[in-house]
Image: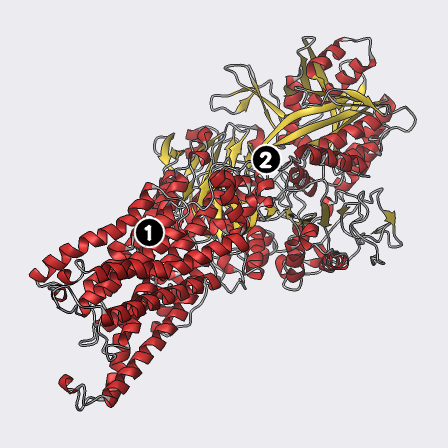
Amino acid sequence: MSNNKYNGQDPFSDGNNLIDLDHGRSSSDVFQYTPYESGIPQSQQQYTTRDSFSFGEGPSGGRQMNNSNPFSDPFEDDHNNSFYDYDNSGSFRKAPLLNTQNRPPYEDATGGGGAGGFFNGIAGKINNTNDYIGMRDFDDKSGGQSDFDIRKIWGNIKAKVSGKKLTSDSGKKEPRQIYIMNHSANASFGYYDNHISTTKYNFATFLPKFLFEQFSKYANLFFLFTSIIQQVPNVSPTNRFTTIGTLMVVLLVSAIKESMEDLKRSNADKELNTTRVQVLDPVSGDFHTRKWINVKVGDVVKVHNEEPFPADLILLSSSEPEGLCYIETANLDGETNLKIKQAKEETAHLVDPKRLVSELDHSEIVSEQPNSSLYTYEGNLKNFGNNDVLPLSPDQLLLRGATLRNTQWILGVVVFTGHETKLMRNATATPIKRTDVERIINLQIVALFCILIILALVCSFGNVIKVQVSKKQLSYLYLEGTNLVGLFFKDILTYWILFSNLVPISLFVTVELIKYYQAYMIGSDLDMYYEESDTPTGVKTSSLVEELGQIDYIFSDKTGTLTRNIMEFKTCSIGGRCYIEEIPEDGQAQIIDGIEIGYHKFTDMFNDLRDVSSSQSAIINEFMTLLSTCHTVIPEVNEENGQIKYQAASPDEGALVQGAADLGYKFTTRVPKGISIINTITDQSLDYELLNICEFNSTRKRMSAIYRCPDGVIRLFCKGADNVILERLSKDEPQPFVDATLRHLEDFAAEGLRTLCIASRIIPEEEYQEFAAKYYKASTSLEDRSGELDAVAESIEVNLFLLGATAIEDKLQDGVPETIHTLQEAGIKIWVLTGDRQETAINIGMSCKLLSEDMNLLIINEETKHDTKLNLQEKLQAIYENQPENEVALESTLALIIDGHSLGFALDPELEDMFIDLGSRCKAVVCCRVSPLQKALVVKMVKRKKKKSLLLAIGDGANDVSMIQAAHVGVGISGMEGMQAARSADVSIGQFKYLKKLLLVHGAWSYRRISIAILYSFYKNIALYMTQFWFVFTNAYSGQSIAESWTLTFYNVFFTVLPPFVLGVFDQFVSARLLDRYPQLYQLGQQRKFFNVNIFWSWIINGFYHSAVIFLTAYYIYSYGNMLPGGEIANNWAWGTMVYTTCTLTVLGKAALTVTLWTKFTFLAIPGSFLLWLGFFPAFATIAPLINVSKEYEGVLAHTYPSITFWAVVFGVSILCLLRDFGWKYLKRIYSPESYHYVQEIQKYNIQDYRPRMEQFQKAIRKVRQVQRIKKQRGFAFSQTEDQEKIVRLYDTTKKRGVFGELSEGI
């Protein structure tokens, strides 16, 4: 293995070498065991490497770098070296093909230990276990707060009471016995019903789980203790029920909100549970429609094309030959390629329902216990026909969450239902999430509590000292003989209650209402309504809305989230000319350096085709014939309208065949020995005899088909990745189109298109006969059959003639590139976690602007933990050694690409620090070929290592649920892969593009609104109730209240309740248009500019300051100016009313200085609240004493409102207090403005933005960089499942379907 050093070289100096792979690691390195691959024997680690022309041969035969620069590796598709060899579609989870085993490539001898990859590798041996398997099964070092698990708590209590040791239920259990279509026999086993619930609560857990969540907030614990103290006789200076009553209201409001949000989840579950499916009635022998929730273990169900499976099924038969069926598992593992399942040969004939009933009447299935391994299954079918036992394997297992594709129907027996299905075994309970703001508040409430204790101690000591020192002056209080120690502790409780309002109990009701209404407004935003699927944005956890404005990392799925999973034949290069349906702007064909670049229309291609005298006509005909013949697609003809639907295991291959059909070469018929093509341009039907198929795999990266054509000539048609096709071109005949095709491939790659090179050759009869003999011998080999077949194919795939190239667009969701670009400008780092191949992920990253041409792609694709460690160290070392002054500038040019195998090593505790260090220095990270569990582990690792960062995860499939629930905020897309992610998420949206407004606008608004509302609520309570503290120094520490108790209660209930609500709901510090225009403003939330410890205490200190100014000025003014016009003197209640009124006006004035958007609601809340108090006081002071409620107010009204001193103090002192706030606000904006201050000026004065537009300039620069690239990364758009030749030879589409829809001989 080579040892790379930098020797002082600048790894960024060469603009041509921007992509790194694996530093020339030798493939002979020993695989090292890690905890992420438990159960994978070392002896079974097999890797194959193929030397690229970009690398030299080292002494060991491995690849060595020709350049010591770690950033200089030319791009090479090395995905075949990965542990996550996704079969041929990008998965290590091999699809069941005919009689092959559906097992991962690395499995222990028992067949169970290693299966399931990461699900089993980390969770341990999970076969035959009845435990729930989820995220909690794994070691989470996050140190965060764990979820509330009522089952675990109950188990612990039960163990302590019984004195028995608590044991896990993970011991080996007997296999489950399932009697087919016999509910009464199965009922005795107590199998789960098919009900699915993703709710946070149920009837039994609501109260304990809700109370646990609420009393984890220290404020609620504080008020609970306060309310208990108030019940002690002769201690409380206020009404004994004021705190407990208010706390009950707070809990009631929270309970109602939680119930309503959980009801939304319940309704979504109900919609799924009431989906319909056909179930076989053993009595009548017919299928009847039944709800999913009523499907039971042992039922035989019939699932039609495009329908999801209602439970985990064992496949009995299908409409296709030999019981074949295609399924899509994108909702489970993110893979877009279809998988093939096959029924047992003995059951494949069961298509008649009545025959099903008769032959399965006494049959039973002995099955493994429910577990979370998606890719393993063991069971037996017993007492069926003449067979005593039929073994069942993953080939026959159809999982809930998957969808039937390209198959008219299947029949299956239900083996696992509801929460025992493998999908739900991989799900986790809805976690309790707490926001960053709540965590800060919790800590600050502890600090406020300490201040309260200090205040209570000061007052208590003061009272004891006063009583002891001034006994003679206080003789009228009859305090002789008082126990001073008892008095001291009693005083502590009294002052605790008196100062308890330093923590505003009304805050939590206000915040709950604010968040709920913010969630309502987000859901009502028509800009985030997806009309096509009638999907509005939904906030299911409103308590997290402010976190939407503080996100640092986004973890996104690709398939269905960024892309539509729809492949479209976009353009092609034939004979050195590019053809496209619509020529883009500035895309006209022109000759540059002897190469034609630009596009011609498809109509021009038809004209060239008709000109049979030109060589271009023959090239086009050969090219299009190859597209319509070289594939394994099955045509399905709709008998009603005659339209053909192509059944393709790979969406790429289906797009190529459909593209050829649209251009006049329509593939119509497949029989075991050939195919038929209709040329709609010449109106000819041509038959091609299929001789052999050399299948695609991840090592070959190409597919060939050998046909005897209508003219009797044998031709080999080949399509594949550009590097493997180019090295097999003939050296003896001219290749006129190579340079032009390579240039076109670079242009296609720059647009993010998926490309293939197309080539062919004529095979002489003698050469073919020799090849056929070798091919037959290899196909019957008992040792290394696939290797033998590849070697034989290699011998015939030579001397090719390059015809051109194709380009397929993996269509992105609307607005994805713009959204990602804007989010990156906002300072959010985006990590894409996908199950796709490396080159596919890179090209999608390019097309969606996650990656750009000027980025350095740091690629980690290693085979061993040691190599992964060295790779990480070398890249970090290069970054440290070449660290520029502007670190941000460096980070904006780096992107990390890591495959699932290397990621497994990188997540090891030994390497995770280096991995997160490197990943956090990159603008974007792409993790390829990752399992669903790895997605969650990556999120949890970043969450654990970046404690101050907030994480958002977004996806649309069931495979994204664990990731979504692991993040601080989970967003689900109601997409093509189902609703599982949307049901489990905190927020659901219809399209990825809505994430931009959700975060940049609603998130930023919500964060600032919640922050201001909370800060203001603390401030206003401190401003009033701290006057009570200053008052104790003048009332002999007696605990005398400064104002009447009900008036103090109404302060938070009526007179200051509206300002924080209006600030939290309607205030906009910057308009939505400018927040979108200046995404950098989002960094205010990331940097905690509106709510942090310093800001919190600045508001608290300001409250102390205002309370001191109000008390002292009022005290000294009334010391000498309390004489009324009639010669009377105002008592302490009149003075207290004046202080109360001044405080109310001051805090309302503070709200006026804080608000940035004045609406009718703002006027109602701020001036309106003061007017409400001015009107309320006379009425209450008049009526209350008459009904013996507040006798303190008797005669007070006459001593307040008529007094000029009263009004002078109220308005004069309020202005005096706010002068400091106004001055600070002025100085802050003038001499130390924040970024949003500038934007507010732009908004206020409608200043035009004259910044130069850089888009065209940047586009031109990117073009120049593309041309300068030595080698482009081109993702070939092709993948297949193995044994495709065997499958296609089973089909004869000339046959007609029988009465049950099965394929039968035509009459």
Q: Give residue 338's mark.
A: 2
Query: Where is 624 relative to 692, above or below?
Result: above
Of 348 and 526, the residue lying toward us: 526
Question: Which residue corresponds to mark 1?
Answer: 1059
Q: Secondary structure at mark 2?
A: loop
Kind of residue at disc 1: Pro
Kind of residue at disc 2: Leu
Task: Name the side, left or right, on which 662 lies relative to 457.
Answer: right
> Which quadrant of the figure has residue 610?
top right
Task: Please state, as top left, top right, bottom left or bottom right, where the N terminus lies in the image.
Answer: bottom right
> Which quadrant of the figure has residue 622?
top right
Residue 563 coordinates in the image, percent (x, y) = 58, 36
Task: Please state, as top left, top right, bottom left or bottom right, where the C terminus lies in the image.
Answer: top right
Task: Name the side, left or right, on which 422 lies relative to 776.
Answer: left
Residue drawn at (80%, 47%) of the image: 73
Of 461 and 1176, the residue lying toward us: 1176
